[in-house]
Image (cartoon, helix red, strand yellow):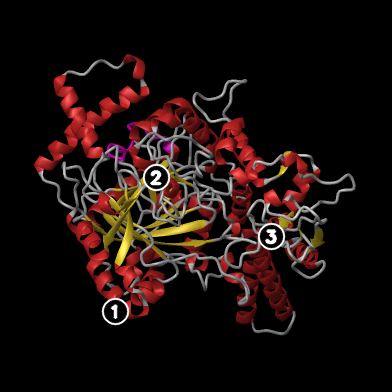
């Protein structure tokens, strides 16, 4: 059984949807999913024991696309090495002892693995007999004559091209250039203005969303009440709710982005640093990220007016609203089911305009299991005087020398007395004491995903890399994208007019295409020793290059990635009031250029439910101690319930169509039926993948 009320496999920690096997021994409650059963019967090298087979598969799956011949990437941890490191002492039994019998029956695993080792596991189900099969048949019957139109964006989006041509010189252009890939037609991202979103824009959004592209919605705050998101306003609103909360919530845990250790700080002091900036005693910026504030699941309770204001901002709420979104599959769960925590969640962090190289305000590279939308609700730029700039540049040069010596220890020259003095100062700095009295960075703490924020969530806050020098258009523009190029110029002008007081965006996003993930993994496998994480030390080991959430690609890394693998992310700045849509399965990272307050929600769209299921299977292969391991979304169950609701509603609407109706009523019913059929078709394949039987 998984944490809380989630019912899952004790072996792989994946949620159980329907069929599973359970130990009938009343003193033992060991359960395994059908995938674990299949692996045992297939004679997997290590049975289905999660700590061995899942980790081995995860590492091998990542390596297989990157290896050339039999040569492993330099320094890359082998599955055997990682297994030995990850496997706890109580799991040191011979996993070959647990295997399926010749007749296919599966015994309960040995006590060392959490079972009783004395009974045969019995096949059981959660839903009524044949319910899933009947659901699939009903969905197929409803959608057999309905097919989503094919989307061909290989020559650019016709909506974007037409709009950009007509609005040449207008400030309503709907694209933003985010990459400069050669011979590519997805360099421009759909970027509508929230004020002008209508029915046609909904279809336009769906075209890009089905293509797996991010979307940027400008001016989302125009639809809100105008409530202030100033941190002190939020703090006062939070204090009014203090009677409902424990006093301990006034002292919060933050993350120091220099060493990724926890720092306990008074919430008022944190917000003061948000506005004015903080620095270590040697002048280096102290960049803090607030962790879990307001506490999980209490955002609307602690900040009810801000919660209502945020929901009013949400673009395309049919997808994004966590309770009322018609196309958000997470809203289709029955009242009795345990709901996943989809937000809203706040991500509050300091920022620095230039890329520091160490200690940047970042959310590290990761991939969310669901779709997400992230709105930037407040920014402010802490002032840095000329003297501090000089100190920062001096320390940055020392860091470059230190990095070179770590990467090429055999060719490092002996430093002179001046260099030795600088290095001593740097070392003293990295054993800083400014806020370390309340730091928690013990190894046993760092190994627990719940205690240390590696840049988690996703729907977590996203922080990004500097894109200075990339806002200008290329000298040569393909004629087919000329209208888009002109549109980009207009967008830049609009930004300057609407946000004249903002010198730069609040955050920089890097979002990678799904098809580029294998090459991205290969790059990280090749260069992982060049990155730093806990205690600002080089990364010690890698389980999964993306799901570990330990890497952040700086400008030099992205340039290297482009040169070696011809992979380039969508890179763009997020300005105040902009909502960024991130499709499930797209790895991304963020760096704050200013102090930022971002608010985000997760959602599950019909277009991406298959990708969510694929990621669930990928996370299943991670070791139990991994931060991304637990299947908290239960997307397969979401898919089944959503398909059931869509089938019931479509059937009801079709029955009404057959009854005498007025012309207007018929048109409304036809539109509603088309929507439900679209949902059902989008879920049809997902439901099929959820119907595995033992």
Q: Is residue 408 above or below residue 500?
A: above
In the rendered picture of this protein, how many numbered marks are placed on residues? 3
Whether pointer 1 and pointer 3 mark residues with C-beta atoms closer than 8 Å, the reply is no
The residue where tag 1 is placed is 240
Q: Which mark is residue 165?
A: none
Secondary structure under the numbered disc 3 in the rendered image: loop
Label 3 CA crowd tier, 10 Å (few <14, some 14–19, many 20+)? many
Q: Secondary structure at mark 1?
A: helix
Q: Position of residue 131 (x, y in %)?
A: 78, 68
Measured as percent of width and height from the top left, residue 222 is found at 32, 68
Check if mark 3's residue and mark 2's residue have beta carbons within 8 Å. Answer: no
Q: CA distance from mark 3 to mark 2?
A: 47 Å
Q: Position of residue 161 (x, y in %)?
A: 44, 48
Residue 417 appears left or right of 498: left
Q: Judging from the image, what secondary structure is the residue with disc 2 in?
A: helix
Q: CA distance from mark 1 to mark 3?
A: 41 Å
Is 266 positioned to the left or the right of 384 in the image?
A: right
Tell whether position 474 is magenta.
yes
Label 3 sits on residue: 16
Give the Cα distance between marks 2 and 1.
Answer: 49 Å
Circle nearer the N terminus (3, 2): 3
Location of mark 2 (residue): 484
* Depth check, front residue: 131 or 402: 402
Which quadrant would residue 47 be assigned to in this image? top right
For the record, the magenta segment spans 467-479
Tell me if residue 271 is in the magenta stretch: no
Q: Residues within 10 Å of mark 2 (few under 14, many from 20)?
A: many
Quadrant housing the C terminus:
bottom right
Q: Earlier in the sequence, mark 1 or mark 3?
A: 3
């Amino acid at each position: 059984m998984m944490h809380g009320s989630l019912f899952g496999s004790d072996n792989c920690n994946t949620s159980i949807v329907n069929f599973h096997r359970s130990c009938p021994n009343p003193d033992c409650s060991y359960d395994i999913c059908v995938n674990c059963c299949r692996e045992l019967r297939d004679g997997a090298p290590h049975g289905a024991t999660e700590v061995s087979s899942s980790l081995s598969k995860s590492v091998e799956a990542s390596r297989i696309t990157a290896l050339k011949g039999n040569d492993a990437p330099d320094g890359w941890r082998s599955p055997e090495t990682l297994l030995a490191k990850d496997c706890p002492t109580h799991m040191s039994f011979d996993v070959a002892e647990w295997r399926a019998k010749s007749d296919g029956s599966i015994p309960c695993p040995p006590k060392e693995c959490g079972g009783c080792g004395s009974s045969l596991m019995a096949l059981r189900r959660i839903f009524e007999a044949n319910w899933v099969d009947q659901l699939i048949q009903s969905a197929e019957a409803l959608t057999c004559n309905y097919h989503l139109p094919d989307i061909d964006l290989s020559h650019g989006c016709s909506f974007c091209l037409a709009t950009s041509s007509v609005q040449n010189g207008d400030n309503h252009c709907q694209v933003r250039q985010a990459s400069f890939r050669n011979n590519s037609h997805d360099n421009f991202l759909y970027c509508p203005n929230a004020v002008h979103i209508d029915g046609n824009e909904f279809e336009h959004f769906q075209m890009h969303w089905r293509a797996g592209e991010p979307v940027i919605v400008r001016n989302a705050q125009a639809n809100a009440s105008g409530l202030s998101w100033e941190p002190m306003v939020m703090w006062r609103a939070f204090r009014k709710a203090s009677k409902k909360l424990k006093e301990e919530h006034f002292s919060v845990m933050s993350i120091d982005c220099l060493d990724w250790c926890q720092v306990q700080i008074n919430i008022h002091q944190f917000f003061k640093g948000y506005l004015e900036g903080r620095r270590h005693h040697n002048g280096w910026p102290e960049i803090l990220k607030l962790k879990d504030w307001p506490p999980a699941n209490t955002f609307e309770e602690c900040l009810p007016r801000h919660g209502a204001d945020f929901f009013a901002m949400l673009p395309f709420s049919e997808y994004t609203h966590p309770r009322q979104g018609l196309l958000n599959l997470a809203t289709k769960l029955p009242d009795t089911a345990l709901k996943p925590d989809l937000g809203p969640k706040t991500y509050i962090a300091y920022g620095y305009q230039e890329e520091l190289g160490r200690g940047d305000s970042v959310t590290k590279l990761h991939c969310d299991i669901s779709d997400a939308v992230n709105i930037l609700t407040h920014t402010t730029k802490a002032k840095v005087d000329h003297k501090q700039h000089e100190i920062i540049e001096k320390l940055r040069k020392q860091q470059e020398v230190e990095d070179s010596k770590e990467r090429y220890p055999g060719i490092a020259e002996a430093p002179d007395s001046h260099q030795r003095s600088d290095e001593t100062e740097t070392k003293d700095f990295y054993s800083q004491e400014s806020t370390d009295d309340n730091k928690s960075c013990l190894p046993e703490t760092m190994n627990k995903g719940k205690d240390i924020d590696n840049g988690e969530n996703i729907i977590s806050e996203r922080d990004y890399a500097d894109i200075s020098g990339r806002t200008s258009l290329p000298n040569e523009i393909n004629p087919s994208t000329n209208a888009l190029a002109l549109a980009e110029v207009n967008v830049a002008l609009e930004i300057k007019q609407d946000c004249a007081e903002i010198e730069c965006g609040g955050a920089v996003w890097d979002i990678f295409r799904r098809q580029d993930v294998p090459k991205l993994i290969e790059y990280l496998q090749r260069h992982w020793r060049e990155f730093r994480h806990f205690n600002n030390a080089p990364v010690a080991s890698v389980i999964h290059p993306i799901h570990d959430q330990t890497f952040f690609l700086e400008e030099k890394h992205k340039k290297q990635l482009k040169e070696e693998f011809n992979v380039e992310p969508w890179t763009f700045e997020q300005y105040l009031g902009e909502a960024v849509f991130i499709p499930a399965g797209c790895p991304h990272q963020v760096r704050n250029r200013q102090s930022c307050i971002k608010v985000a929600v997760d959602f599950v769209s019909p277009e991406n439910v298959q990708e969510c299921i694929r990621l669930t299977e990928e996370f299943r292969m991670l070791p139990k101690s991994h931060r991304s391991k637990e299947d908290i979304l239960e997307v397969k169950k979401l898919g089944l319930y959503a398909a059931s609701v869509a089938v019931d509603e479509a059937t009801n609407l079709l029955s009404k169509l057959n009854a005498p109706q007025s012309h207007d009523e018929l048109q409304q019913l036809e539109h509603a039926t088309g929507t439900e059929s679209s949902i059902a078709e989008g879920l049809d394949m997902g439901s099929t993948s959820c119907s595995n039987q033992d």
